[in-house]
Amino acid sequence: MNILIVGVGGQGTLLSSRVLGKYASLTGKECKLSEVHGMAQRGGSVVTHVRMADKVYAPIITMGEVDVLIAFEELEALRWKHYLKEDGHLVVNSQKIFPMPVIMGLEKYPEDVEEQCKSVKNCHFVNAVKLAEEVGSAKATNIVMLGAVCALCNMDKEIFAQSVTACVPAKFLELNQKAFSAGYDSVK
């Protein structure tokens, strides 16, 4: 399975990739990760490639080979959707984070992002920030998204929940377990 996680610095994409890596190991799969941080500390794009299979030879996913694209921000979904396979899943957090050129008034944020994303056959929008806030903190948005991906891709819910437990700090465990369930239930 080839998973591409895209977002903006600070959204938890890196933790999400670690959870997916743990899921792979718990299911007996090999996993390779590749992270591109760019200007993440300044709100720039973050892209993480996650590849899991019986044998993985390279960490980078080529265009047209992504099974699941997890977009933590709408514009990032639009920027990366061409990496999806024809029958791939696009899972998008319903959140707009304006990039610096938009903030500075040099460019406009596209008004039709959702319509463009819906050109993908298996496109799913999740109001992950709202769901995370409902369970206790917007900081758990990434785990809400992983719950949705688990459900949409028919991944093993119990093993995925164990992966979350293994990767989040103990003091945030209850919050993240609730966030995972909220994401899972939101698309079932």
Image (spheres, rainbow, N blue to C red):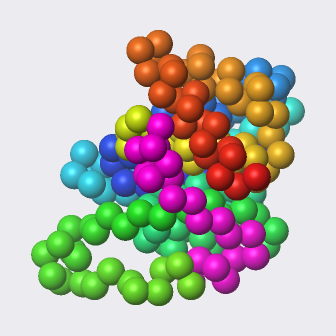
Q: Position of residue 72 (x, y in %)?
A: 48, 55
**Membership of 128 in magenta stretch:** yes
Q: Position of residue 21 (x, y in %)?
A: 65, 30
Residue nearest the observer in this picture, 40 or 180: 180
| Picture quadrant of residue 165 | top right
Residue nearest the observer in this picture, 77 or 127: 127
Count up the numbered dots: 0
Instruction: Report whether 39 appears left or right of 165.
Output: left
Residue at the spot 48% in from the left edge and 28% down from the top edge: 175
Whether residue 107 is situated above or below residue 45 in the rendered picture: below
Q: Position of residue 159 (x, y in %)?
A: 76, 25
Q: Is residue 115 visible?
A: yes
| Picture quadrant of residue 45 | bottom left
Residue at the spot 40% in from the left edge and 86% down from the top edge: 111
Instruction: Report whether 181 appears left or right of 1.
Output: left
Residue at the spot 15% in from the left edge and 82% down from the top edge: 105
Whether residue 120 is situated above or below residue 87 in the rendered picture: below
Residue at the spot 69% in from the left edge and 46% down from the top edge: 185
**Membership of 13 in magenta stretch:** no
Residue nearest the observer in this picture, 53 or 97: 97
What stretch of residues is rendered in magenta?
116-135
- Looking at the image, the residue that sits furthest to the top is 170
